[in-house]
Amino acid sequence: MRTKICGITSYEDAMTAIDAGADALGFVFYEKSPRYISPVEAKKIIQKLPPFVEKVALFVNVDAQTVNTTCKETGATLAQIHFDADKAFYAALEVPHIKVIRAKKREDILQYTDEYRLVDAYCEAYGGAGKQINIEWFEGIDCSKIILAGGLTPENITALKKQGFYAFDVSSGVEISHGKKDAQKVKEFIQNAH
């Protein structure tokens, strides 16, 4: 099972996640988030990372040019689009990207079924609220292209594996405080996910 540790704000937390076996790291470029990191600081971390780790840049309510420029300048390898955007926006992206579904009801998770997508529980704030989506919504659905986020912890991850999700994405479930990871929880989360 693949894992992404999101809300990385320090090189130490990045390496803790990588050493524990994380496949991807998330950097939040949304200024209203308590896990916000500036592109300049993210670049300093990304430049020092070992190869074969996906560096995911999270965006909320920006234009395509901002996504393209930020990813290129920081070295991020994938853009995570946390808002509803039109076809013109996606057509203008010059970087690999993934769409986020902030699900309010079961039907929402059926969007973009031909694409890999991240599914999170809907909440007013964007990301990292620790709210878990209704797992019953995934019954009878092909989850092989879904990255599950929202309310995940080292304790509840094992029970979710049977759904066959592509990956798990965690932020608040492995933190000491906003933007500061708990090394033991990160290790346990990745171990339990595998």
Image (cartoon, rainbow, N blue to C red):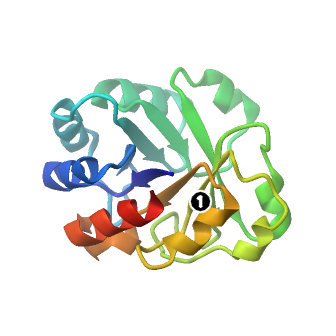
User: Which residue occupies the foreground of this view, 179 or 14?
Assistant: 14
- The x, y position of residue 190, in whole percent, is 38, 60
Q: Secondary structure at mark 1?
A: strand
Residue 152 at what x, y percent from top left? Answer: 49, 71
Count of numbered tags: 1
- Quadrant for the C terminus, please: bottom left
Q: Against 164, is 75 above or below?
A: above
Q: Which residue is mark 1?
A: 148
Establish if 159 lies above or below 118. Answer: below
The residue lying at 38 percent from left, 66 percent from top is: 189
Q: Is residue 177 visible?
A: no
Say above or below: 29 vs 182.
above
Q: Position of residue 27 (x, y in %)?
A: 35, 48
Look at label 1 and name its amino acid: Leu
Q: How many neighbours does mark 1 have within 10 angstroms: few (below 14), some (14-19), or many (20 or more)?
A: many
What residue appears at the point 39 percent right and 30 percent down from the top-left corner?
71
Asked whether 171 or 160 is in front, the reply is: 160
Q: Foreground residue, 100 or 174? A: 174
Question: In the image, is 142 to the left or to the right of 166?
Answer: right
The quadrant in which residue 177 appears is bottom left
> 109 or 161: which is nearer to us?
161
Q: Position of residue 53 (x, y in %)?
A: 34, 36
